[in-house]
Image: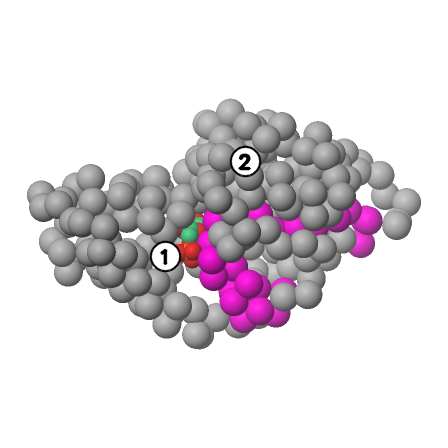
Amino acid sequence: MSDISALFKGVIFDLDGVIVHTDTLHYKAWKSVADRLSIPFDEEVNDRLRGVSRGESLEIILEQSKRRYDGAQKERLCTEKNGIYVDSLASLSALDVAAEVSDTLKLLKGAGLKLAVGSSSKNAKTILSRIGLADFFDAVSDGTNIQRTKPDPEVFLKAAAMIGLKPSECAVVEDAAAGIEAAINGGFTAIAIGGAAASNGARFNIKSLSELQKIILK
Ligand code: BG6
Ligand code: MG
């Protein structure tokens, strides 16, 4: 533990759109499915998909559809989207993590904070591995260990338990409105990054991860 004192003992990071730009890959994959089905889909609808599960994302997209889909058809559409998405992850590498992101992560870790991932994605571990951060975080709580998606706080509560901290001891960094709500619901300090998560009751709003330094470290 270094002698730098911090406001928190731990930080839980959302993955897609916070650590790495996979939010744009989710968008492209859903866009390709929506275009094939002639369902209107744009960045505004996409912002509502941030932080929510694959199945719930599809439900939001289908709100704009004239036809109805049964359970089996929805399952196939989720599989189709995930196939396109996973293919697009193949080219990800450590180069996709911005320098200010990796510098900030290293700085916080060096200051003795526990760092965890709290992501709704079932592909989180694949992504962490591709970007060279598989062993960096103290814990990963993701779509494979939760029953309820954000804005339910489950994914963050599990992450906090994995690093042995109480919600009041952790900050959560999120780019999704649903993620900010989840953090607040769970009793965490919410830090919003980017436009989609702003104005949703977060204690802090930042534009880039490097701003965490002045919020978290004293
Ligand atoms: C979240 C994304 O991190 O993961 C959502 O913000 C996505 O857009 C969700 O729907 C689930 O991801 P996956 O990889 O399990 O389909
Ligand atoms: Mg996100």
Q: Residue shown at 13%/45% (left/top)?
A: 68
Q: In this image, 35 relative to 184: left or right?
A: left
Q: Residue shown at 70%/48% (left/top)?
A: 162
Q: Quickly name the residue at label 2.
A: 153
| Label 1 residue near ligand 1, CB within 8 Å | yes
Q: Which mark is residue 26?
A: 1
Q: In this orientation, which residue lies closer to the viewer: 197 or 163?
A: 163
Q: Secondary structure at mark 2?
A: loop
Tell me where residue 101 appears, x and y as whole percent: 61, 55
**Which scheme is used to colour this image of the protein?**
one colour
Q: CA distance from mark 1 to mark 2?
A: 22 Å
Residue range of the region highlighted in magenta in the rendering: 110-133
Q: Secondary structure at mark 1?
A: helix
Q: Which mark is residue 199?
A: none
Tell me where residue 81 appears, x and y as whole percent: 30, 61
Asked if residue 192 shows in the view, the reply is no
Tell me where residue 139 appears, x and y as whole percent: 67, 54
Vertical relation: 158 (above or below) 128 = above
Vertical relation: 188 (above or below) 132 = above
Asked if residue 63 shows in the view, the reply is yes
